[in-house]
Image (spheres, rainbow, N blue to C red):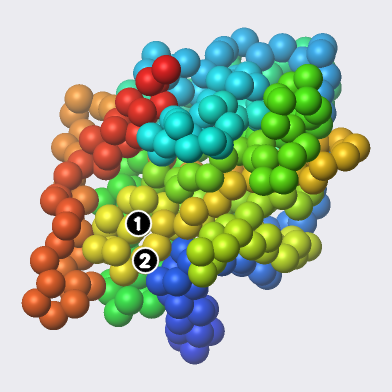
Amino acid sequence: ADGNEQDADAVAAAANIMGEAARGVGFFILVNTGIDEDLMADSLRLMREIHSDSNVRFPVAFAPPESDIGLQRKGASSAARAMNRIDTGEPKVDHIQSLMVGPADEERCKRMARHSMTGVWPEGTEAAYTFREKSIEYARELEALSLDVRALLALSAGLDRRTFITPVEENAGMFRYNFYPPMDEADDPCAGKPGFAHLGAHTDFGVCTLLIADRPGLEVVEDDEWRAPPVVKGGVYVNCGDLMRQWSNDAFTSAVHRVRMPTGAHDGRAGIAYFSCAYTNRSPEYNEPLIVPVQELLAEGATSTYKPEKWSEIFQRRVTLLAKK
């Protein structure tokens, strides 16, 4: 959909379905994406292995703003804090361990004045080195798919297909490789109780997030109720984020979601989230454009509640919340 010659009827049909979902819940599932299902399965399996093997070394810790790639250990993140909802009874920290992975292309990172993954990749086992190869391959697939998603959402609203692409095309996507370990009351007094979440309710901060996982657990708010989307073999789950909601003048919804693991014995959950265009360009030569809310999507006579601003400024607000203790 991103500028290549495609079947017009198929593109229009896909755009309409995705647009309807984005205007409602802000969540949908992609099937028949063309991504090799073995690549997805291998990525999840290897990610589970590197998080579970004590022989794997993680050279760099995730510690923004100094480092926003690397390992984030269990309990270091907080969806409640990111949403400024620390006193609502939800877990104050997330019970997940994450590896944040940025682009591996050295030249691209140099242009963006960002640290590449050199010296950051996990090491120490054969699985760790294979994980690096698969991650680079999977990143290429997800970046291309995310461009299609953004193009189709624009087409669904009658806009130019590059509306949600061009202003942020100098940025790059970022992966969050998550492992949700088994838990009991020794880990958290609330573990195992109804409604306990490994990852509390939140919205994502960017344009869209593409997700895969090897176990159920994801829940999305629909009609004011938590609902578990169906498990679809080879499916890629998509959340619209806060930037998309702002950019579209609230035409598209930012999906509220969480991860709630089943009670009782289980072997944890591996999940991979790809945040489209989240790795921002910091080059002093980069003239960052403003994200201007699309006026055409406002109802007649309505006024936008958003001002034009830079994506890096929007991003920094969320990071500031994450840093609060």
| Residue in front for this viewpoint, 261 or 61 | 261
x, y percent for residue 173: 46, 41
Report whether residue 264 is seen.
Answer: yes
Image coordinates for residue 17, horizontal then vertical, percent: 51, 79
Name the kind of residue labelled 2 in the image: Phe
Quadrant of the image for the C terminus? top left
Residue 3 is situated, as x and y percent measured from the top left of the image, at 39, 69
Residue drawn at 65 percent across, 40 percent down: 197
Tag on residue 252?
2
Query: Dot 1, how many residues are within 10 Å of its Cα: few (below 14), some (14-19), or many (20+)?
Result: many
Looking at marks 2 and 1 on the same chain, the residue that comes earlier in the sequence is marked by: 1
Indicate the quadrant where residue 267 lies: top right
Q: Residue at x 68, y 70 (%)?
A: 32
Identified at 72% across, 12% down, the residue is 57
The number of discs equals: 2
Answer whether residue 281 is visible to the viewer in this image.
no
Indicate the secondary structure of the residue bearing disc 1: helix
Report the front residue among 195 and 310.
195
Q: Amino acid at mark 1?
A: Met
The residue pinned by badge 1 equals: 244
Label drawn at residue 189:
none
Relative to 48, does residue 292 appear above or below in the rendering?
below
* Residue in view at x 27 percent, y 55 percent: 246
State the residue in front, 24 or 35. 24
What is the C-alpha distance between the residues marked 2 and 1? 7 Å
Whether residues under marks 2 and 1 lie with C-beta atoms below 8 angstroms apart, the answer is yes
Query: Taking 52 as reference, is 83 left or right?
Result: left
